[in-house]
């Protein structure tokens, strides 16, 4: 099997060296070049034809966002963003993921484990090499359901690689009368508040980062905080968010399996579960538990996934009642949660 050929783009010679060394330690990866700015990278992409590019956001001459826009317009290819864990870095990274970057990884800092962070780059590069990357087209404005009739159901959604674009597409179709919706998206801890704010601007619903004890209400969407806790749903004078400490489950914290299992137990048949694009297995067993409890379930189809991993595993387990493309996923979820179903 041929190695994954990677071009590393970063204005810091130290960071280029660290990333290159970490990637070359993986037997499935070969770094074929390293560039200090987008102009140098442009020539290397043409000459070396890499499978994946790792791209710094903050660089001289042309920042990573501008360069990514050119890549996705002229030569769509898998790109993994390497970002600082700052508020500005989070917002720019989210913009990059909207533009078509496959995933992001945080730069190591004094407060983080450099080895763990750099090992994560290799994991995400290998996922990116299998990703389906398409030219971004200017889509039609989202059509929001005016005839949606709430049924009292709640919606639980799980996603990972490619989930930023997918969730923006889905929630742009949600209205102020949508079912209470809870989301676990694999994302660095400092990014989820900015992501919830971005979703809030795109949706007719009110989107917020979940807090412990929050009451689930119609017209509101709750995004699991990244990093340190799992999001669960419990019954306590209504349905509420509960943030719990604990080890990663299915390799993740927050874990989609944890969320889905809690919904199966607390809500049962009055729920809709949706599993979206992402690498690995997280959420598959939990979605199966939801379906066994009587919930309606849907998985994103292979053609519209950036990485058809989590939905594939769920489908093969029998957890997915039906599949839907990303373009129709928002309406499918609302149909399944509708009083008219």
Image: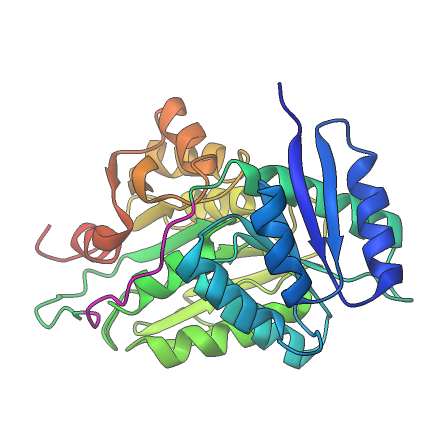
Residue nearest the observer in this picture, 294 or 288:
288
Q: Check the image and report above or below for 218 versus 249.
A: below
> Residue 105's image quarter?
bottom right
- Residue at far top of view: 1
Q: Which residue is drawn at 24% across and 66% down?
A: 139
Viewer-closest of 295 and 101? 101
Q: Can residue 332 be seen in this view?
A: yes
Residue 154 lies in quadrant:
bottom left
Lateral position of residue 31 relative to residue 80, left or right:
right
Q: Residue at x 42, y 34 (%)?
A: 289
The answer to whether residue 213 shows anywhere in this view is no
Q: What stretch is highlighted in magenta?
A: 133-142
Q: Position of residue 54 (x, y in %)?
A: 66, 53
| Rendered location of residue 10, percent (x, y) | 74, 63
Residue 104: % across, % down: 62, 57
The location of residue 166, given as percent across then percent down, is 38, 56
> On the rendered image, what quadrant is the N terminus found in?
top right
């Amino acid at each position: 099997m041929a190695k994954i050929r990677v071009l590393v783009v970063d204005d810091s010679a130290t960071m280029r060296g660290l990333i290159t060394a970490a990637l070359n330690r993986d037997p499935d990866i070969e770094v074929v070049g390293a560039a200090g700015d987008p102009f140098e990278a442009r020539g290397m992409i043409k000459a070396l034809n890499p499978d994946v590019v790792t791209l710094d956001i903050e660089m001289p001459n042309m920042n990573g966002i501008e360069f990514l826009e050119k890549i996705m317009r002229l030569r769509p290819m898998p790109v993994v963003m390497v970002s600082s864990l700052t508020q500005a870095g989070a917002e720019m990274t989210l913009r990059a993921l909207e533009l078509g970057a496959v995933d992001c990884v945080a730069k190591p800092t004094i407060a983080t484990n450099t080895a763990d962070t750099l090992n994560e780059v290799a994991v995400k590069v290998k996922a990116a090499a299998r990703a389906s990357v398409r030219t971004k087209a200017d889509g039609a404005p989202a059509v929001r359901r005016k005839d949606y009739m709430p049924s009292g159901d709640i919606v639980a959604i799980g996603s990972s690689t490619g989930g930023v674009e997918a969730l923006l597409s889905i929630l742009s179709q949600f209205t102020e009368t949508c079912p209470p919706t809870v989301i676990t998206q694999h994302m660095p801890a400092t990014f989820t508040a900015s992501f919830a704010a971005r979703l809030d601007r795109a949706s007719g619903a009110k989107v917020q980062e979940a807090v412990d004890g929050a009451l689930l209400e119609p017209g509101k969407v709750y995004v699991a905080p990244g990093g340190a806790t799992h999001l669960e749903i419990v019954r306590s004078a209504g349905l509420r968010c509960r943030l719990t400490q604990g080890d990663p489950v299915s390799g993740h914290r927050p874990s989609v399996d944890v969320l889905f299992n809690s919904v199966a137990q607390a809500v049962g048949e009055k729920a809709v579960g949706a599993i979206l694009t992402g690498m690995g297995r997280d959420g598959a067993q939990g979605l199966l538990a939801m379906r066994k409890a009587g919930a309606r379930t849907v998985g994103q189809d292979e053609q519209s996934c950036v990485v058809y991993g989590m939905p594939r595993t769920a489908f093969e387990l029998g957890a997915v009642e039906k599949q839907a493309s990303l373009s129709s996923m928002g309406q499918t979820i609302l149909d399944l949660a509708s009083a008219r179903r």
